[in-house]
Amino acid sequence: MRPEITHKLRRSGFLAVAVCFLSYPGTPAQAADLQGSSVQDAYIAGQLTAILEREWKWPPGSYELLVKDGIAYINTESASLTPSFPEASTLGVRGLVDLHVQLSAADSGNTQARQSVPRAYSFLGLTELTEAFPVGDLFAHLIADPKQPQLFASMRKYEIGSTGSITLETNRVTVGAVGFGDTFGLYRRDGSAPGNGLQVSISAGIFAQFNLDAESDDLVNADYVVGFPVSYRHGQHSARLRLYHQSSHLGDEFLLNYQPERINLSYEALELLYSYDWNAWRGYIGGEHIISIEPASFKNNSLHGGVEFRSGLGHKRRGQWLGGIDLKSYEEHDWHVDWSLKAGYEFNAASQAQRLRILAEAYKGFSPHGQFYNTRSDYFGIGFYFGY
């Protein structure tokens, strides 16, 4: 094997291992899938409120109560309420894991410092509770977005158009598509209700396509994406602001066999998406602006939107039906709408910490794969998507 090819393979292997390591802590089921834990926390909060106000005669408004993942946080300005506070296990509240009670700054001589927090964060519905390396993301991952960082493997039948600078011998190709990636939470400030808050994360992914009709299953293209998303959730509303980088590289076998006119596609972009949940449905809309790109002639703006459905986890089953359609429109393609459709079933572990999705897939529009961006590339197939 030629030294330069060996070097490229080693570099690609290192990047793949790095992204897999980044994705290991994983993302649990998306915010919509975590509804069960939010309901449990709401139940605990209701039981504690009844105990505090009815049994112990705490005046309403004399305390703040927040429950997250079975842990209750109670803050009060009255020192007379806290000295003999019992242990969590003696309260008899089902699901209550632990209890933290503290005095506010009014009794600690730092009232001004404490009151500055509500003024700064109350309009976002945030609290003082913070968490390093939180699990999951406050903006639910997009089901049908071809560039959602996640772990998957798909078998697809492609029909390749003749436009663009890269063409193949045939316009029908069997492709194996794989992805390695995830979103890793760095910091979260909790909201006033379970599941709400503001989070900063790092996300990364590798998206590769292999020509399964070739004798050695040639690598055709690989896209490398890394970004820093800031996500926010307040009830049914959520949003994501993401600064990210993407670079694309053609496979060595593809370069040797076809000797195409290579395009060095690499860019940095700023993306903003807003999402709204309504029962089992979710809609999202937004767009992105490319800050810098090579080739420089590429136009900078695009629109992005979609609709998703999740049937919800039943009490006696460990899975749900789900699907989504993702729409993108690029100024580079005169605002032609590209659509991606995915639908199928999600199997969940008993703890709901891991999941497997089996999804039918279809895509129509300009290719989402790197240097083929000016080529029409329609496909259909089936994919296996793994989550943590």
Image: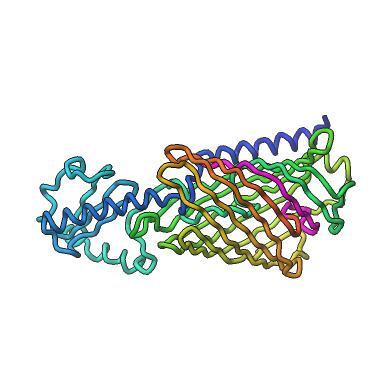
Please check the rendered image and state whether residue 112 is part of the magenta-colored stretch, yes or no.
no
Position above or below: 337 against 140: below
**Front residue (pair 374, 255):** 374
* x, y percent for residue 348: 49, 41
Q: Residue at x 18, y 56 (%)?
A: 50
Q: Residue at x 79, y 41 (%)?
A: 211
In the displayed orientation, state which residue is furthest to the top: 1
* x, y percent for residue 70: 31, 46
Count the marks.
0
* x, y percent for residue 9: 74, 35
**Front residue (pair 8, 101):** 101
For the magenta stretch, what is the residue range?
A: 368-388
Specify the quadrant of the image occupied by residue 206. top right
Please check the rendered image and state whether residue 372 is part of the magenta-colored stretch, yes or no.
yes
Position above or below: 12 against 302: above
Is 271 left, or right, of 117 in this rendering? right
Quarter holding the N terminus is top right
